[in-house]
Amino acid sequence: MGRFPLFYSYIAYVFVSSLVGLTVYCRFPKQYPTIEWFILMVAWVAEFAVLLEVSDHIFEPYLTVRRLGRLLTVGMCAIFFFAFILPSLLGHQSRTVVFLDFSRSAFLTKAALIVALLVAARLYQLPLGRNISGMLLGFSVYLAINVANVALVERSIRGYAGIYAVVGPSSYALALTIWNVALWRSESVAPAPRGLRGSIKGDAGTSGEQIERYNTELMRLFRR
């Protein structure tokens, strides 16, 4: 749990909130929709925090530009929030329509963020490792299933309303299976690419000279 505190906190929240939701559904069915809406909203926000933690680990070998991952993550979340998520919340529509619009926008935002992180890792030749790859794969499967699930509900396919409530939890179960396999053994931090290793660890020259050499290496990788 030491390497991924936000991720394991998210898993614990999903487990506890599922028990709370089941209890409310059995004892207070009228309050269940409101409680479940709140539980899902918190979970979806927590998923953004988990992806932020993943970005930190992806860029962990870069001691000088470690904030690049956070900047990429926060920037994309802000763009999608104001462009897609906020309009769905401010629209004058029924609760069901708002719920579906918000969930679809949130899922698509996270999917785009995962793609951006993978592109950045590819660009800078960063090895993801078993743990990070498994976390991203689990989230990708979970998001893909839920995007399709929401799309089918919006099309008002006859008889699918009952299936919708089953597919969501099933996607969690599938993602948890992938995460269990990927995180069964914790990996050490992946080393930085060979071309940048000397710039990161080298102590020759002034700080300005080291930063200049490091920027040169980054620009060389960026042109590839």
Image: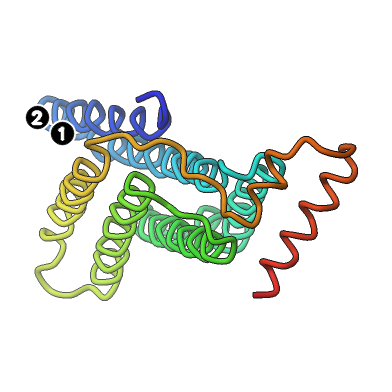
Image coordinates of residue 4 in percent, x first then y, are 40, 32
Q: Is residue 37 left or right of residue 206?
A: left
- What residue is at 45 percent from the left and 54 percent from the top? 127
- What residue is at 11 percent from the left and 25 percent from the top? 27
Q: Secondary structure at mark 2?
A: helix
Q: Give the CA separation, mark 1 to mark 2.
A: 6 Å
Question: Where does the N terminus fall, quadrant-wise?
Answer: top left
Tally of marks = 2
Q: Which residue is mark 1?
A: 29
Q: Nearer the viewer, mark 1 or mark 2?
A: 2
Q: Give the quadrant of residue 39.
A: top left
The image shows residue 114, relative to residue 65, as above or below, that is below
Q: Which residue is mark 2?
A: 26
Q: Find out whether the residues at labels 1 and 2 contact each other: C-beta distance under 8 Å.
A: yes
Image coordinates of residue 45 in percent, x first then y, are 46, 41
Q: Give neighbour class at mark 2: few <14, some 14-19, many 20+ (Cα, 10 Å).
A: few
Q: Give neighbour class at mark 1: few <14, some 14-19, many 20+ (Cα, 10 Å).
A: few
Q: Secondary structure at mark 1?
A: helix
Q: Give the quadrant of residue 111.
A: bottom left
Identify residue type, mark 1: Pro
Q: Give the quadrant of residue 147.
A: bottom left
Question: Where does the C terminus fall, quadrant-wise?
Answer: bottom right
Identify residue type, mark 2: Cys
